[in-house]
Image: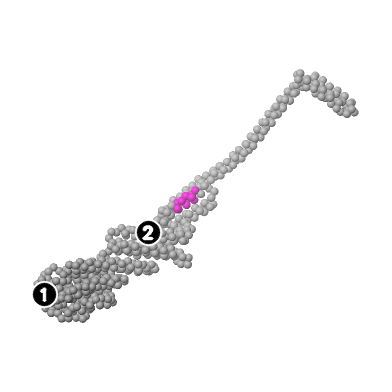
Amino acid sequence: MKRLLACVRDACTRMQLLPFLLVSGMNHEVSDESRVRHSIVEATVEHFALFTETQDVNARVAAAAGNSLNTVERLSDSLSKLQKLSQAIVSAGQQWREKKQVALNAVAQHPKLLVFLEAPALLSDCLRKEMYHEALAVLEHIRRSVQSMENIELFCRLEDETRATLENALGELVLPRLAGQLTVASAVKITTFFRRLGVPEAQIRRIFLQKRGEYVSGLFQDAENNKVPHSRIFGYLTVFKVYVIDVVLQFCACFSPDTESGLCCDLAEWCHRRAFIFVQYLRSSLEKITNGSELASIIEQCSVCGSAAAQVHMDVSSLVNEAIAARVRGLLEEHLSQAAQSYATSMATFSWRPPSGSLWSAPQCPKEGGGVVKDGPASAPLCLLQYLPLAYVLNGILTAFNTIRKCVVPGVELFCISRVEEIVRMMANDLAQDKDLLLAVESDEKQAYLQFVNAFVCDFYPHVLICVQELLGDKPKHVLENRMRSAIESLRSLIPSQIDSCQAEIVQQSFEGQPQTELTPMVGDGEGGIESGV
C-alpha cells in the first residue's frame, strides 16, 4: 500500500512539474488541470480498495489473455497438423478405394487373370513342343497387355518372368535342338522363330552353323570310338556324305543366298572347316589300313561320297584322293622295302658256286618278244625257284601288286614305277659289279653267274614287266622298260646265244627234291588286275 501511495505521489509530483515547462500563457489551464488531478488523487485515495481490486483484475485478465493467446497459437498449430493428417487420410482412403476396386475387379476376373499368370509356363510348353507360332502369340499378348497396364507391378513382374522363361527355353530347348538331329522343316521353323524375335540375320546364321557344327563334331567323335579302322572310316564317310551335306541343304533352305553382302562366306568357312576335319580323321585312320580289299572298298565309298558332295559344290575328291594315294604308296613302299631287304639278306649269303653233283651249262635266252604279255593270266616262272634272291624280290613285288591291284588311283603309277625301277636297278647294279671278277676265268662260278643273269634278264625282268602292264597298263610298262633298257641290255650282252637244252633241263632237275621258296602266282581277276592265289 505504501508503495502504491509513493507511486501516486511521484505521479502527482511529475504532473505538478509539467505546468512549469509550458508557456506562461497557459497558467490558467494548468490550474484547471491541477484541480482535475487533485480530484483524481482524492478519488483514488477514496476508492483505493476498488482501485487495487481493479488492478488485480486487470493483471489476472492480462494473464488470462496471455494464456488464451498461447492456447490459440497451439490450437492453430494443431489445426494445421490436423489438416495435413486429414489430407493424408483422404489420400490413403482414395488409394485404398482404388486398390479395393482393383481387388474387386481381380476377383471378378480371377479365371482370366489365372490364365494370364500361366503365360510363362505356357510359353515353355509351346517351345518344348516346337509350337513356335503359338509361342510368339503368347509373347505378343503379354507385350500388349503390359503396354496398357505398365503401372501395375503384377504385370511388370509377369513380363520379367516371361522374358526369363524365354531366355531359359532358348538355352535349354531351342538351341540344343539345333545341335541334334534336325529335319529341314524344323530348321526352317527355328530360324523363322529367331527372325520374328528380332535376332539379326547374320547372328542367326552364325548360331545355326555353330550348333550344326557341334552336332557333326559329335557324330565324328562317335565314329572315332570304333576300334576297327575299316568301320571307323566308313563312319567318317557316312557322317560327311549324309550329315554334313544335309547341313548345307538345310542352310540353303533356311537362308537366301546373298553373295554381295558376303553372308555366304559363313557357310563356305564352315564347309572348309568340316572338310579339313574329315580329311584329318580319314588320313589318321587310313594309316592303319593294311588290307588291299578294305582299301578298295574305302576308295569306292569315297567316290560315292565325293559325287554327293560335288552336288552341293563341296567337292573334296582331290583331298580324299591325295590321302588315299598316300596310303596306297605307303602300302606299296612297305612291301617293296621288305622285298628289297629280303633280297639284300639273301644276296649276303648267296654263293655263285653250284651244288655238288649238278651239271651247269650255258644259259638259254628266250627269243625276242619273250617279254610280251600273252592272253590270259600270267604265271610266275618256276625256274626262279633256283635263285632265292630273285624269288624273294619277285614274291615281294607280286605281294605289293596284289595288295594294291584294286587301289590304283592317280598319283600311284609314277611312284610304283620309280620304286620298281629302283629295286630292279639295284639288282642289275649288283650283277654288274661281279661281272669282271666272275667272267675273268672259266669256272663253275662263271656258269652259275651267267645262269643267274639269264634268269634275271630273261625270266625275272620280263615277268616284272608283265605284272606292271597288268597292274598299271601299257604306258607305265613302256616307261619302266625305257628307263631300264641300257642296264638290261648290258647284262643281256653277257649271255651266250647258244645253249644245250638237255644240260639246262638237267640243271633245273638238280634242284628238285630240295627245299624251295614258293612264288606267289599271278592270277587274272577278270578286271585286268592281278591277285594272289595264297
Q: CA distance from mark 1 to mark 2?
A: 75 Å
Q: Which residue is mark 2?
A: 215
The image position of residue 181, as x and y in percent, is 37, 59
Closest to the observer: 156 or 243? 243
Q: Is residue 5 shown left or right of residue 364?
A: right
Total numbered badges shown on the rendered structure: 2
Q: Is residue 159 magenta?
A: yes
What color scheme is it?
one colour
Q: Is residue 32 shown left or right of residue 347?
A: right
Q: Which mark is residue 164?
A: none
- Disc 1 is placed on an element classified as loop
Which region of the structure is painted magenta? 157-167
The image position of residue 532, as x and y in percent, is 21, 69
Q: Which mark is residue 359?
A: 1
Closest to the observer: 91 or 328? 328
Residue at the location (44% across, 57% down)?
132
Residue at the location (17% across, 79% down)?
496
The image position of residue 111, as x and y in percent, is 47, 48
Determine crowd level at label 1: few under 14, some 14-19, many 20+ residues with C-alpha closer than 10 A.
some
The image position of residue 140, as x and y in percent, is 49, 55
Closest to the observer: 396 or 404? 396
Which image quarter holds the N terminus?
Answer: top right
Determine crowd level at label 2: few under 14, some 14-19, many 20+ residues with C-alpha closer than 10 A.
many
Magenta residues: mostly which secondary structure? helix
Closest to the observer: 145 or 497? 497
- Disc 2 is placed on an element classified as helix
Q: Is residue 127 magenta?
A: no
Above or below for 457 versus 202: below
Quadrant position of residue 209:
bottom left
Which image quarter holds the C terminus?
Answer: bottom left
